[in-house]
């Protein structure tokens, strides 16, 4: 007996006759995704743009599907689409946007930096930043904070501290001012069916160019300051000195691209996940108490460990 399987096409989300789902995805993507999953299931297809110029955008909502796309079957999926290309133009061809031989080379150079000892060290820095944020929140007027913005700033501070170490104060203001608008600029260009080349001096292109130049100058300066010293434990220092016999080392452009990709990938999705996690905890007091108890136990263990090392 011979068995065959067929793949059903993903259902198409109904959009407007003129622009499809483009306006929904630009103006309120979360609401668009929630409606699509509710109405069509875990794999859907959006069609964005005017007739004749529309792009197909597939969305995968289940954990199992995300694991297939990002891990177990990642080799079957490409990054040859307009959104990845816009990101490459804005922040470079680092681990998030690269593929094939370039990705493998970068991964071989970067992966050894994430040892258990170093990751544990990063965890303590995250805990320090969280404690500082909690102290600020205790003084918030009315006990209310704007959670999404707070989580974005928190995640950016954490990844900036891990990347730049003691230079994080210098870097944070520039990163916060430049990276989010560059992301928004890239996203809008990705959705736009007709867009001017980046070399044209449109107001949006000129502003993006200024922001990119400022961000590049910040990263290049910090990278240069690490070249003649290896006594720091921040991620930029480790990247500067990363090398192996097969792949050599990262050149100046590659170093900057890795730093920018870590900044981008290290804060955007993390901030969103944290905001939703806290939102859910606020709506489920019993689970909130369990998390609070676990945090208290971990804090006690951490303090005891610190005292033991001090002795």
Image (tube, rainbow, N blue to C red):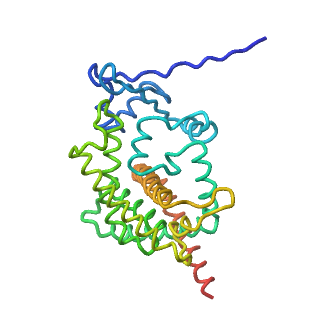
Quick check: 290 above or below 42?
Answer: below
| Residue 134 against residue 104 in the figure, above or below | below
Q: Quadrant of residue 136?
A: bottom left
Q: Quadrant of the N terminus?
A: top right
Q: Residue furthest top?
A: 1
User: In this view of the protein, which residue sits in the foreground, 246 or 281?
Assistant: 246
Q: Judge whether 210 appears above or below 57 on screen.
A: below
Q: Where is residue 21? Give x, y as percent.
A: 33, 28
Foreground residue among 272 and 294 = 272
Q: Is residue 95 above or below residue 221?
A: above
Q: Relative to residue 50, is residue 283 drawn left or right?
A: right
Instruction: From the viewer's perspective, tell me whether residue 212 is left or right of residue 302.
Output: left
Q: Residue furthest bottom?
A: 311
Q: Residue at x 72, y 14 (%)?
A: 3
Q: For the C terminus, give its image quadrant.
A: bottom right
Q: Residue 89: x, y in percent? A: 40, 46
From the top left corner, tell me how far across and down residue 37 is, in percent.
Answer: 44, 30
Give how far across and how far down residue 30 sits, in percent.
Answer: 36, 39
Report the number of discs. Answer: 0
The answer to which quarter of the image holds residue 191 is top left
Residue at 55% from the left image edge and 18% from the top image edge: 8
Residue closest to the far right: 1
Residue drawn at 31 percent across, 19 percent down: 51
């Amino acid at each position: 007996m011979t068995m065959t399987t067929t793949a059903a096409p993903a259902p198409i989300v109904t959009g407007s006759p003129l622009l499809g789902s483009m306006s929904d995805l630009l103006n309120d993507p979360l609401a668009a995704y929630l409606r699509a999953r509710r109405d069509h299931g875990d794999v859907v297809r959006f069609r964005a743009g005017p007739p004749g110029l529309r792009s197909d955008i597939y969305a995968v909502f289940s954990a199992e599907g995300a694991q297939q796309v990002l891990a177990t079957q990642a080799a079957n999926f490409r990054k040859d689409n307009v959104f990845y290309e816009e990101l490459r133009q804005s922040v470079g061809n680092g681990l998030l946007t690269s593929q094939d031989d370039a990705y493998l080379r970068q991964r071989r150079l970067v992966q050894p930096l994430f040892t258990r000892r170093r990751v544990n060290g990063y965890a303590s820095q995250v805990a320090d930043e969280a404690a500082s944020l909690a102290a600020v929140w205790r003084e918030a007027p009315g006990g209310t904070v704007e959670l999404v913005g707070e989580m974005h700033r928190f995640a950016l501070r954490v990844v900036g501290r891990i990347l730049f170490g003691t230079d994080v104060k210098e870097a944070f203001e520039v990163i916060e001012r430049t990276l989010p608008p560059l992301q928004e600029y890239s996203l809008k260009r990705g959705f736009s069916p007709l867009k001017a080349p980046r070399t044209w001096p449109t107001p949006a292109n000129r502003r993006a160019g200024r922001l990119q130049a400022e961000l590049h100058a910040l990263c290049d300066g910090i990278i240069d300051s690490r070249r003649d010293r290896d006594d720091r434990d921040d991620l930029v220092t480790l990247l500067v000195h990363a090398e192996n016999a097969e792949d050599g080392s990262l050149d100046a452009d590659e170093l900057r691209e890795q730093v920018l990709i870590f900044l981008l990938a290290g804060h955007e999705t993390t901030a969103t996940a944290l905001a939703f996690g806290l939102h859910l905890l606020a709506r489920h007091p019993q689970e909130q108490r369990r998390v609070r108890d676990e945090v208290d136990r971990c804090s006690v263990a951490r303090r005891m460990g610190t005292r033991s090392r001090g002795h």
